[in-house]
Amino acid sequence: MDERSDLAGVVLGGRYELHEPIGAGGMAVVWRARDHVLARTVAVKIVGSDRGEQHRIRREAQAAAGLSHPNIAQVHDYGELTAEGRVLPYVVMELVEGGTLADRMADGPVPPRQAMRICAEIAAALAAAHALGLVHRDIKPANVMLGPTGAKVVDFGIAAATAPSGTGELDPEVLGTPAYLAPERLIDDAVEPASDVYALGVVLYRLLSGHSPWSSEDTTQMLTAHIYLEPAPLPPVAGVPAFVAELCERCLIKDPTRRPSAREVSALLSRGATHPEPGAAASLPGGGADATAKDARPRHRGRLAVAAALLLATGAAGWLLIPDDPPDGVTAAFPSGSPPPAAPGGRSTAPRAGSTPGSLPTTTKATATTTGATPDPAVTRTVAPVLTATPTAGPATPSAPVPTRTTVAPPPGPGPDPEPVTRAWSSDAGSLTATCPSPATAEILTYQARKPFKVQSAGTGPSAAPAVTFKHGNAVTTMTVTCSGGQPAMATT
């Protein structure tokens, strides 16, 4: 039987009239259909399964129907069609008008900001599923629809209840697409949330770079690369913050326990899409540096230039204001009658021959105390920087002129560290306050659910992306806080 043509006009379950096929993949065909009961257009996915698969598909469709999230295509119904002695399960889903992410990638490069936003929405969908113990198992561009309201993940029909490696509850077959399969899926088919994060990391890498993290010519090489080969580093991409590049690499770590959660991926990519910070150093949540050395050097040189200008201006003013007699409080550079010390580089600070007492020399040299120099034993207090002036004649005529030293106070320091910024946010599900104990670390101080929601989980930190999840029925809202440069920001998923 050809499901593409022979089923047109068939009414399933007494309410879903099939119009035309709109997609196909694997053993399934997706039809545009009309729900006569609720007067709406829906998508019906008919699965050409083997005998005995109906029970598994029905069980997983029931689990997927419990997901309620704006970035997940809603599952409405399940049924079974008997045709020519075959039982064909079908799943009725929300119809998302628009093409798939795979179609969009085939049209040309995706702008970095759009790529980060799409992957942030995929991660938000996965976070909602993982919170309920569901794993998608086949995250790939063909299973992401790009509709008017954003990205929507489809095909939770092959999702499975979480079964971590080593529990003895592993599925007998590997489901998914080879290009996006996590290593643990291939080794023992462990079904866990980190596997979805790995697949999403591959999608993000491809969107930002335009190619796969590995160079593979066939499926066997691809599967081998997932298990044994480290991915190539993500090349620099204009408009992509450093912390997003590091996040992509963390998603592709072979060890699933070291990958970030989908919730953290969503929060960081949302921040990157909103504030891409092109060409600037960015904080690296999860262990990265606060700023790159390339970005830090120009700012450092700028501060040195300002300090040098202030020092020269202050030194020149101090020289012009030196009186004939040393004022009170000026420390003598060396005792009367002793030879003047040599200036750095062997230059003498003694008066030049032919100089007239009481007049300024034609050439002025200034010396400053430097770190590691041997201090003058006659100096009772060292103040840096120090300007040494050629001495002038005093009221009496001593056997040797007494030079003077003018001390210049250093410019004021930066002062105490500013108080951490504390901010408050609220949503339909609850509210919280948070602060940044460090430039890239956030901490949730208080949180409270808003009726009828209740607190499902809370990770207050300090960490890169602490979050509180509120739940009411099938509605799940997660408020995640991140920090960049000491400024807290919140994302709701």
Image (tube, rainbow, N blue to C red):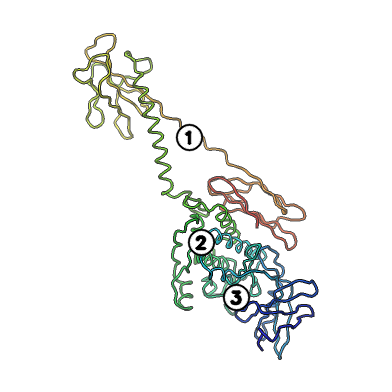
Q: Nearer the viewer, residue 169 or 455?
A: 455
Say which residue label 3 marks. 170
SS state under label 3: loop
In the rendered structure, are the residues bearing label 1 and label 3 in contact, judged by CB atoms less than 8 Å apart?
no
In the image, taking residue 418 as reference, residue 292 lies left or right, namely: left
SS state under label 2: helix
Which badge, 1 or 2, is on the more N-terminal residue?
2
Relative to 441, say whether 68 is above or below.
below
Circle 2: residue type: Cys
Circle 3: residue type: Leu
x and y percent of residue 280 in the render? 47, 50
* C-alpha separation, residue under disc 1 versus residue under disc 3: 59 Å
Relative to 352, say whether 73 is above or below.
below
Classify the position of the C terminus by image quarter. Answer: bottom right
* C-alpha separation, residue under disc 1 versus residue under disc 2: 36 Å
Say which residue label 1 marks. 414
Q: Residues within 10 Å of mark 2 (few under 14, many from 20)?
A: many
Residue found 22% across the figure and 17% down from its top: 355
* C-alpha separation, residue under disc 3 versus residue under disc 2: 28 Å
Instruction: Please say whether residue 486 is visible from this viewpoint.
Output: yes
In the image, taking residue 473 as reference, residue 267 lies left or right, namely: left
x and y percent of residue 270 in the render? 58, 56
x and y percent of residue 225 in the render? 46, 72
Say which residue label 2 marks. 248
Q: Nearer the viewer, mark 1 or mark 3?
A: 1
Residue found 48% across the figure and 66% down from its top: 210
SS state under label 1: loop
Q: Residue furthest left?
A: 353
